[in-house]
């Protein structure tokens, strides 16, 4: 079961992505289907600069809130950046790679949730 602190961090991450105009943000609760994390947050950006800026703002906001980044992959190429915060894993894609990898389909056993629903469970 996901604790409220993890939910708080997930909400903070999504709000940071929204502030930088991320596109098509998806939150998938994978806590019941995987041990690797509680949430996958998937978002899109329009170009390398925006994708890196989205990554930077999430890292900054969560770090300041006390959730350090454990690992980052793909920052230099910025067609798919993976940010691993432990219980929350954030994927930021360009349009082409998001369609190609289709994580929402791969993780369809998880529960897709809306930001307001996540906030309401706090």
Image (tube, rainbow, N blue to C red):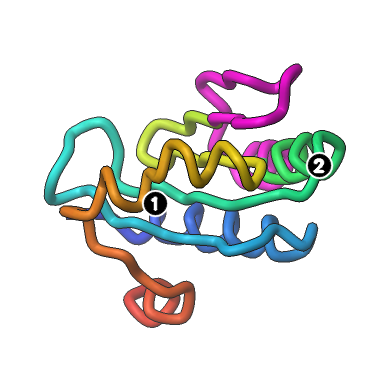
Question: What quarter of the picture does the C terminus occupy?
Answer: bottom left
Asked if residue 112 lies left or right of residue 92, the reply is: left
Q: Residue at x 48, y 33 (%)?
A: 85
Asked if residue 71 lies left or right of residue 89, the reply is: right
Q: Residue at x 29, y 56 (%)?
A: 29
Q: Nearer the viewer, mark 1 or mark 2?
A: 2
Lower sequence index among marks 1 and 2:
1
Please rate how many residues cluster around mark 1, counting C-alpha atoms within 10 Å: few if below 14, some from 14 to 19, many from 20: some
Q: Which residue is mark 2?
A: 47
Please rate how many residues cluster around mark 2, counting C-alpha atoms within 10 Å: few if below 14, some from 14 to 19, many from 20: some
Q: Which residue is mark 1?
A: 6
> What numbered label is drawn on residue 70?
none
Q: Residue at x 70, y 22 (%)?
A: 75
Q: Range of the magenta residues?
A: 59-82
Q: Residue at x 42, y 74 (%)?
A: 114
| Residue 21: % across, % down | 77, 62
- Relative height, residue 113 to residue 116 (above, below): above
Please tell me in which quadrant of the rendered image residue 5 appears.
Answer: bottom left
- Asked if residue 122 is among those painted magenta in the image, a careful observer would answer no
Question: What's the distance in space between the residues labelled 1 and 2, CA to CA?
Answer: 29 Å
| Residue 113: % across, % down | 35, 70
Front residue of 79/31: it is 79
Number of labelled discs? 2
- Asked if residue 76 is among those painted magenta in the image, a careful observer would answer yes
Asked if residue 50 lies left or right of residue 26, the reply is: right
Question: What quarter of the picture does the N terminus occupy?
Answer: bottom left
| Residue 17: % across, % down | 68, 56
SS at mark 2 in the image: loop
SS at mark 1 in the image: helix
- Relative height, residue 74 to residue 122 (above, below): above
- Relative height, residue 9 to residue 59 (above, below): below
| Residue 44: % across, % down | 63, 51
């Amino acid at each position: 079961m996901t604790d409220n602190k993890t939910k708080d961090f997930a909400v903070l991450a999504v709000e940071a992505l929204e502030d930088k105009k991320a596109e098509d943000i998806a939150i998938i609760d994978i806590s019941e289907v995987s041990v690797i994390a509680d949430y996958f947050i998937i978002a899109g950006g329009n170009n390398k600069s925006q994708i890196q800026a989205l990554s930077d703002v999430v890292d900054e906001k969560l770090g300041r809130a006390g959730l350090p980044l454990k690992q980052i992959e793909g920052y230099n190429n910025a067609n798919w950046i993976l940010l691993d915060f432990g219980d929350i894993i954030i994927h930021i894609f360009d349009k082409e790679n998001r369609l190609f990898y289709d994580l929402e389909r791969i993780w369809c056993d998880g529960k897709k949730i809306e930001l307001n629903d996540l906030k309401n469970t706090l």
